[in-house]
Amino acid sequence: MKKSIFITGAASGIGRATALAFAQRGWFVGLFDVNEPALADLYDRIGPKSACCRPMDVTRPESVRQGAAFMAGHTNGRLDVLFNNAGVLYMGRHHAMSHELKLRTVDVNLTGVLNGIDACFDFLKATPGSRIVNMSSASALYGTPELAVYSATKAAGSALTDALNIEFEPLGIHVCDIMAPYVKTPMITAAAVSATSVSRLGVHISAEQVAEVVWKAAHGRRRHWQVGWMMRLLRLATLAFPFGRRPLVKLLHFQTASANEIK
């Protein structure tokens, strides 16, 4: 039987690239997203022999449980990898962002991960050598200006990864995450408001590059995987020079503004 991967946020960007990469290598991919037209287009491209497809909202536990059961029905209960990829990013100064967008960021990026893990847990536990791969970010390394709530959700996700990596080890489930700087996806390129750090760091990573690291994570034993040389350098710098993290973040991410400019 084919190995299988359950992908949230599969309709575009990293999720889509990952689905195509795994399907091309003989895996069965479960495609789940709230974007039904884009989801259907991806399913048509991969085909029913290598994929199943269902609209799903990661913020709703029942929707995710139904998605997991739907996937299990196509794989006889086998689930080798859960890829918690679904996420949202709203950039801008914290005081200028609506409270609703902040809560939605938490709901999708953190609650959505918890819903995925809980809904898929029994299937992962029943599959030898299974893995949970959480999509993280460079902003998990240190609280990032103009991405404050997003950064907080990714830091929480990193802590969750560390804890469950230990807790799930006796159960045979390896837990890890993927850390990447800005990726060329609609979440960044089509954003209504862009953070200062986007122009300073640039957007050099493709969704396909991230998908290749997800592939490695599905077979390797690392806990934190970095995408690209810049991400490796940032992580090394924060580990080697912990007292320099704040100045580095200020330099890379924040544009000095006077009190009159902050409105």
Image (cartoon, rainbow, N blue to C red):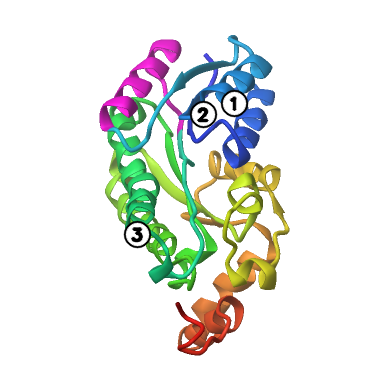
**Disc 2 residue crowd, few under 14, some 14–19, many 20+, Cα 10 Å:** some
Give the amino acid type for the residue marked by disc 1 in the picture: Ala
Q: Which residues are magenta?
A: 61-81
Q: CA distance from mark 3 to mark 2?
A: 26 Å
Query: Residue at the spot x=38%, y=70% of the render?
Result: 95
Q: Is residue 38 left or right of residue 80?
A: right
**Disc 3 residue crowd, few under 14, some 14–19, many 20+, Cα 10 Å:** some
Q: CA distance from mark 1 to mark 3?
A: 29 Å
Image height of 243 relative to 39, above or below = below
Mark 3 and mark 2 in contact? Answer it, CB < 8 Å.
Answer: no
Q: Main SS of the magenta segment? A: helix
Circle 1 SS class: helix
Query: Residue at the spot x=58%, y=54% of the render?
Result: 192
Q: Which disc is residue 38 wearing?
A: 1
Question: In the rendered image, which residue does mark 2 sit on?
Answer: 35
Give the amino acid type for the residue marked by disc 3 in the picture: Ala
